[in-house]
Image: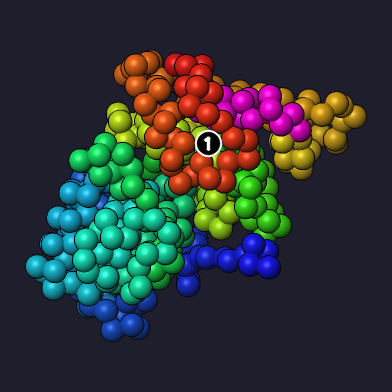
Amino acid sequence: MEEHVKQFFMPRESLFGRGCSRKIGQYLSQRNLCSALVVTDTHLVECGVVNRVTVPLEEYGISFELFDQVSPNPTLTNVREGAEYYQKKGCDCIIAVGGGSPIDCGKAMGVWLGGKGELRDYIGLERCAKDSVPLIAVNTTAGTASEISRACLIIDESQGRKIAIKDKHAIPLLAVNDSELMVSLPPGLTASTGMDALTHAVESYTSTEAYPVTRASALEAVRLILEHLEKACSSPDSYEHRDNLIYAEFLAGISFCNSGLGLVHAMSHQLSATYGLAHGLCNAILLPYVMEFNRNICPGLYDNLWHRVSEKAPENCSEGMASDKMISHIRGMSERIGTARKLRELGVAQKEFSNMAQKALIDGCYRTTPVKADREMITTIYERAF
């Protein structure tokens, strides 16, 4: 009976719309929180995004300290140093500002500070018995959905791999998606984070643990991304396209946070851990190749997805033809927005493929992939993307 029980996780509250980040001070004040640690990276400080979040805090008497040393792929060292700074400054909440890296770092800090002990104690599923310290997640890229998920991925430098904490206590109290903070994103970052969201939607739609709620969310996410991502890249100041990508990212996040992902993410995590490559770009590169691998073994896997999101009426075609159209459409869009790169262009070495393939097999995302692979098969996929 238990195998039929489904759980659904998301933040207690979420804010959408232009200027919604200016509501954070009021939210904290109403909860008697007054001293925040802002967790972010140096780029977001330099380009003024963090300032747009922190200045409105003054109206409500909220003071803040700044920790801006988060790496593009956050590490255990980042988490440890940030947590120690939080304690040193006597903060009572965290405001994580950024994409997946600062938010994942803030979530890991929150879990560690709330539960004490060692961060490694919380690796895995639902290992924390206590609430995180109060956490606000301010998303600045429409891609990772870290602001709504219970998972955070941190690089363990000693092992050269990403470790995952997946716990309901890591979910932020408040998720903030303010399109005013995203219109300045360059086309390249818009493209890679948008492809990250698309990968979330496609993989969660076909996850072995997908169910009607998650599939419906993933389906609408795919539709919105296919309609608005290219337009947002070519018209970065358009709030219409930015807002729709936010909704798509959020829906994809709802889906994968409650149904799991697949082989693209299992492989992508190894590229980020080994080479420090951007997660969204790795997903964009690998997605068509993994979809082809899945389709070759399970021909009709993406047929229904194509029929549901395509503007054309379903055609009378043999099993797998609609899946081919879906894969071709995604590959074409990736080429047009500049994310259809080759791994060799990014400094990846072929000699690492077999080792990364072995690590992908024990990655948490592999568990819910719809088509199982072995080390040789995964190595071949890396080779095709090379």
Does any portion of residue 220 appear in the rendered image? no
Picture layout, residue 241 above or below residue 119: above
Left or right of residue 33, residue 213 in this image: right
Measured from the top left, where is residue 332 in percent x and y?
61, 23
Q: Which residue is mark 1?
A: 263
**Most foreground residue, 53 or 267:** 267
Measured from the top left, where is residue 193 in percent x and y?
45, 40
Residue lying at 33% horizontally and 74% vertically, measured from the top left:
130
**Residue 119 included in the magenta stretch of the image:** no
Residue lying at 25% horizontally and 39% vertically, measured from the top left:
159
Residue lying at 39% horizontally and 56% vertically, measured from the top left:
124
* Magenta residue span: 286-300
Q: Main secondary structure of the magenta part?
A: helix
Q: Quadrant of the C terminus?
A: top left
Picture layout, residue 371 above or below residue 80: above
**Most foreground residue, 41 or 345:** 345
Q: Quadrant of the N terminus?
A: bottom right
In the rendered structure, which amino acid carries the disc numbered 1?
Leu
